[in-house]
Amino acid sequence: MSARDRILAKLRAHQAPQPLPTPDLDVHYAPRARHEDTATRLARFKAGIEGFHAEVHLCAADGWIAKLEELCRAKGVSSLIYGARTPAGAALTSTGLAGVALRAWEGQFEELSADLFHRLDAGFTQARGAIAETGTLILWSSAEEPRTLSLVPPVHFALLDARQIHPTFFDALRNERWAAGLPTNALLISGPSKTADIQQTLAYGAHGPKELVVLVINAEEGAAV
């Protein structure tokens, strides 16, 4: 018998291991459940994301546009790009921002790239939700609101509903049924852009947005989960 035949014989004789049982994730994560109310989850999210140099501002549900206008004025933002075909974008289109030129996302990226990289001061997006445990925003990109809005302009404004802050990443996956379908890009954002060199020196704003500003609405609502 040749060496080749001996190797093949051993492979054929080898019994495949039995598959491992599928873990019960609900049982695994049950001891970590905090049963928090909205205010407590918001406090954990706020502490986490501010630890990575983001800003968090609490607003009334009907007052976020006024707050956005105030922040644009304070930061010298004179132009902002946004998705006009989202609920928040439609509200921006209707109300406008004093002193800020609004640019709706329309057309192809190639037609907008020069403005995105060289002329527009800020981008605005809606957040799908957030994760309290890590201080992380969840954004799902779409044709109406592509990821470019949050990744290119120097300032990224994000609108977050406090009722959509999940205790953990697992809770977000389960509660929002991510297994049923995902967009082309799901973004998890925990602060402005950052990078580190070989000496492990962390620098913020090296690429992409230099500032991340989160406007939180409905902070006073919601029950414990």
Image (cartoon, rainbow, N blue to C red):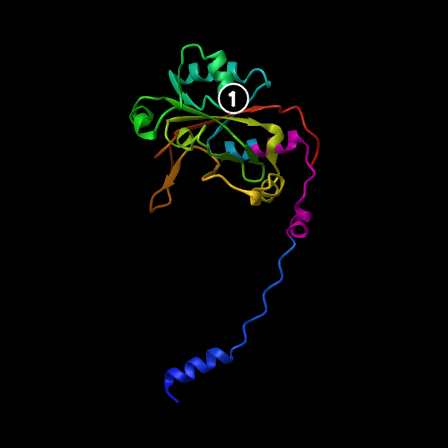
User: Relative to 201, is 68 above or below?
Assistant: above
Position of the C terminus by quadrant: top right
Residue beneath disc 1 = 88
Task: Please provide percent x and percent y for residue 9.
Answer: 46, 82
Query: How many numbered tags mark residues here?
Result: 1
Q: In this rendering, would 114 be left or right of 85?
A: left
Does dot 1 land on a helix, a strand or a loop? helix
User: Relative to 20, is 209 above or below?
Assistant: above
- Residue 62: quarter of image: top right
| Residue 22 at least partly seen | yes
Residue 185 belongs to the span the image colors magenta:
no
Looking at the image, which is closer to me, 55 or 157?
Answer: 157
Main structural element of the magenta stretch: helix, strand or loop? helix
Task: Please provide percent x and percent y for residue 90.
Answer: 50, 18
Indicate the amino acid at tag 1: Ala
At horizontal 51% and vertical 17% (from top left) the residue drawn is 91
Task: Please provide percent x and percent y for residue 22.
Answer: 62, 58
The residue at the far bottom in this view is: 1
Q: Which residues are magenta?
A: 25-45
At horizontal 54% and vertical 42% (from top left) the residue drawn is 181
The residue at the far front in this view is: 107
Residue 41 belongs to the span the image colors magenta:
yes
At horizontal 38% and vertical 82% (from top left) the residue drawn is 4
Task: Please provide percent x and percent y for residue 29.
Answer: 65, 49
Looking at the image, which is closer to me, 3 or 106?
Answer: 106
Looking at the image, which is closer to me, 26 or 18?
Answer: 18
| Residue 117 at least partly seen | no
Looking at the image, which is closer to me, 12 or 171?
Answer: 12
Position of the N terminus by quadrant: bottom left
